[in-house]
Image: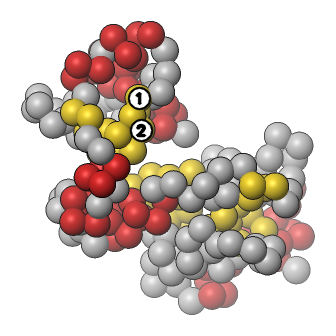
């Protein structure tokens, strides 16, 4: 997800990245000149990628998780747009970032921290991005999350994004939320979600 987002903004200028992790997508931003000319243009906790990424890490301001994920840090980043991935989202807007097919695939990580931080900034947005379907063709937008942990409450994410569009959930009632989410589900699953 991170690499796809960074490729999409490579034509911008003056960008800053504040993240728990940076990956090879950072290299394209560095080459394109999209990053701000500042010592703190990239702040991250860890780097995970290729040798080329590690060689370019002298331009990353590494900080501990107590800084990168701290509410006080995040709410002071003007216009923070926190973009996180998820495994599934239900028609209320509840986000599952941990379980798929009854198996835990990951922990919650910085998801709630970054979304909450973005929502506290002026012009910030909490964005969840996910593919509309699993590799097996199962819909990732589901009527209701199964019993178990919910990674993010229904009122926390501002926007849900799939390859089929954006559902801006801010200020929508439960019926409008469901309609907006169905509209960005994989087309072959929309009718089933609407019933």
Disc 1 designates what residue? Answer: 47
Query: First in sequence: mark 2 or mark 1?
Result: 2
Whether residue 191 can be seen here? yes
Judging depth in this view, the residue of 139 and 59 nearest the camera is 59
Q: Residue 68: horizontal and vertical position, in percent?
A: 30, 50
Compared with 135, 188 (above or below) is: below
Q: Residue at x 68, y 72 (%)?
A: 149
Compared with 190, 109 (above or below) is: above
Q: Residue at x 79, y 77 (%)?
A: 147
Q: Residue at x 21, y 66 (%)?
A: 72
Q: Quadrant of the C terminus?
A: bottom right
Q: Quadrant of the N terminus?
A: top right
Q: Residue 159: horizontal and vertical position, in percent?
A: 50, 65
Q: Is residue 125 left or right of residue 150?
A: left
Which element carries disc 1, helix, strand or loop?
A: strand
Q: Which mark is residue 153?
A: none
Judging depth in this view, the residue of 171 and 109 nearest the camera is 109
Q: Residue 135: horizontal and vertical position, in percent?
A: 82, 40
Q: Check if mark 2's residue and mark 1's residue have beta carbons within 8 Å.
A: yes
Compared with 173, 74 (above or below) is: above
Q: Which mark is residue 21?
A: 2
């Amino acid at each position: 997800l991170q690499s796809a987002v960074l490729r999409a903004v490579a034509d911008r200028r003056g960008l800053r990245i504040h993240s728990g992790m940076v990956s090879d997508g950072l290299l394209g931003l560095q080459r394109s000149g999209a990053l701000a000319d500042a010592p703190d243009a990239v702040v991250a906790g860890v780097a995970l990628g290729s040798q080329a990424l590690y060689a370019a890490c002298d331009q990353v301001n590494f900080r501990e998780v107590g800084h990168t994920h701290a509410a006080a840090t995040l709410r002071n980043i003007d216009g923070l747009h926190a973009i996180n991935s998820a495994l599934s989202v239900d028609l209320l807007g509840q986000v599952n970032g941990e379980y798929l097919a009854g198996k835990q695939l990951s922990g919650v990580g910085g998801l709630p921290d970054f979304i909450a931080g973005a929502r506290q900034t002026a012009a910030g947005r909490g964005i969840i991005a996910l593919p509309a379907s699993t590799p097996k063709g199962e819909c990732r937008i589901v009527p209701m999350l199964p019993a178990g942990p919910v990674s993010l409450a229904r009122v926390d994410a501002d926007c849900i994004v799939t390859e089929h569009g954006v559902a801006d959930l801010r200020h929508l009632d439960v019926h409008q939320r469901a309609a907006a989410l169905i509209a960005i589900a994989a087309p072959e699953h929309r009718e089933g979600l609407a019933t």
